[in-house]
Image (spheres, grey):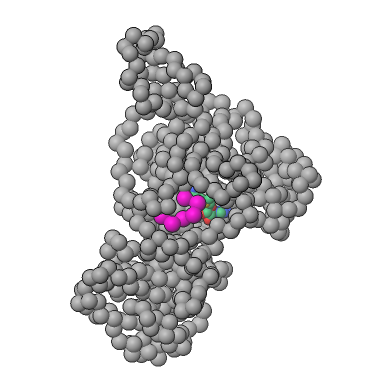
Amino acid sequence: MDELKTNVLYFGDNLEILRNRDYFPDECVDLIYLDPPFNSKKDYNILFKENGGVESEAQIKAFTDTWHWTQTAEDTYHDIVVNGPLKVGKLIGALHDAIGHNDVMAYLVMMTARLIELHRVLKPTGSLYLHCDPTASHYLKLVLDQIFGPANFRNEIVWHYRRWTAVSNRFQRLHDTLFFYTKRDKYMFNMLYDVPANIAKGRKESWKVDEEGREYRWQSLHGKRYIIYRDIGAKKGDVWELPFIHPSAKERLGYETQKPLSLLELIIKASSNEGDIVLDPFCGCGTALVAAQKLNRRWIGIDITHLAVALMRNRLKDSFDIDAGVIGEPVDLASAKALAHEDRYQFQWWALSLIKARPLGEKKKGADKGIDGVIHFIDDASGGVKRVVVQVKSGHVGVNAVRELKAVAANDAIGVLITLELPTNPMKVEAVDAGYYHSPIYDKDYPKIQILTIEELLHGKTVDMPPQTQTSVTFTKAPKVTRKEGEQMAMG
Ligand SMILES: C[S@@+](CC[C@H](N)C(=O)[O-])C[C@H]1O[C@@H](n2cnc3c(N)ncnc32)[C@H](O)[C@@H]1O
């Protein structure tokens, strides 16, 4: 068996990946943070903002958080009841009797199978934080209690944020819930402290000195009395006030469910040390991985969509100049063909990610109907945005594909056709026939229609286009992040 690979991304279903013991032997990670889809009966669409902040019509069903009672749910249910830990099987069997074959049960079954594996891969001193909301938290806590043992429940953390919602018949929902469990009773934990703004203002005589010589006093906060140390503040409570990422914040990358870096930093500081391994099996655009890297931890991320993997890869590159390896993505023509055969959309997203093009999704309108992805760039003195429009063909291609692209790209700067198959001579002639796009800023000609094969892209070929400037990048660029040097943590 190979050594555990860290600082790596996996593309695929986390259950399959976690069950592969070559990837994840027993007790190999220190901290797990998971932010699974919440079963909120809503398709999470990735809403990319068009320039100027208007939500694009083009949306991508990056993942759906609604599960139905399918054959997979039935098979997973059987597997848990027959092969899972006895107590867990009993609970799931009882819930199944009570709830029946419905979406909630399908969600619970899918989460239970994954939590069993996550418990297996956690080190004896390790911790798990499950991020959820009130839609499913009550069910999930039952499952966690059975898998981890109620005695290993440490906290229910309430992440309280402010946002405006248009409800008038109930109270506003302004929090998420994070369940913090440890594998055993002896575990790694760094106490975190909050420093009240007025801490230094205490009059000298109001501080007492404890047996270790530290100055402290009792202080009333939110109606409770806390011990506050003059140098480090008060021990952190289980209600965390942290703002949502503002829609216009630099941190926001356009991923609907992106969580704030500050939230992940708290979790990672509290439950890991430098060099430890942090796993996020539902990692979306990679917030946990960025926080881990910033705090000098090692990390492993898993996601089931190429879109998330592409975003994460770009984010790690932009934030730290890291070229993260992705396990499970096609690496050669044969595996690219296999992906195309398995799932045309995943293939498309992956192919687009090779040239950093933004996928347009399923709800394309009007002239964009024939386009799979776009790359934006700025190429005139007034700052006007130009587009490279991209089509991806996973099947047989002929000269008609080029003609079609020519028509689709008529009002855009450049058209790119990505093909699995080699282009025929008539296709090449048709492409050359389209002439050039002239860049006014660079005073240079670029072929108007370009055909790129997957094989060429895998060997590093890219679109021949004017350079993308900071303001014209297709994916929102993540800000550069500075790694913390040997940060001092207070031990609890
Ligand atoms: C709520 S989002 C996570 C957001 C993340 N915390 C962030 O800050 O960007 C859940 C993610 O889980 C992924 N996902 C859903 N089912 C999955 C599965 N079975 N295996 C791996 N990833 C999955 C989705 O693609 C989505 O990106």
Determine the residue positioned at 57% across, 33% down.
156
* Viewer-side residue, 276 vs 227: 227
Of 4 and 126, nearer the camera is 126
Looking at the image, is 407 positioned above or below residue 141? Answer: below
Which quarter of the rendered picture does the C terminus lie within? top left
> In x, y percent, where is residue 159?
51, 38
- Say left or right for 319 vs 125: left
Height in image: 93 above or below 73? above
Q: Is residue 343 above or below residue 272?
A: below
Residue 279 seen anywhere in this rendered image of the structure: no
Q: Main secondary structure of the magenta part?
A: loop
Q: Residue at x 56, y 50 (%)?
A: 166
Badge count: 0
Q: Position of residue 140 (x, y in %)?
A: 64, 41
- Outermost left residue: 443
The image quadrant that residue 121 belongs to is top right
Name the one closer to the observer, 113 or 333. Answer: 113
Residue lying farthest to the front in this orientation: 168
Quarter location, residue 386: bottom left
Residue 478 in view in this figure: yes
Question: Which region is colored magenta?
Answer: 253-258
Q: Is residue 345 magenta?
A: no
Residue name at image x 35 percent, y 69 percent:
376
| Closest to the observer, 377 or 484 | 377
**Side of 469 relative to 142 (left or right):** left
Q: Which residue is located at x 61 percent, y 46 percent?
A: 168
Residue 14 position in % (x across, y down): 55, 52
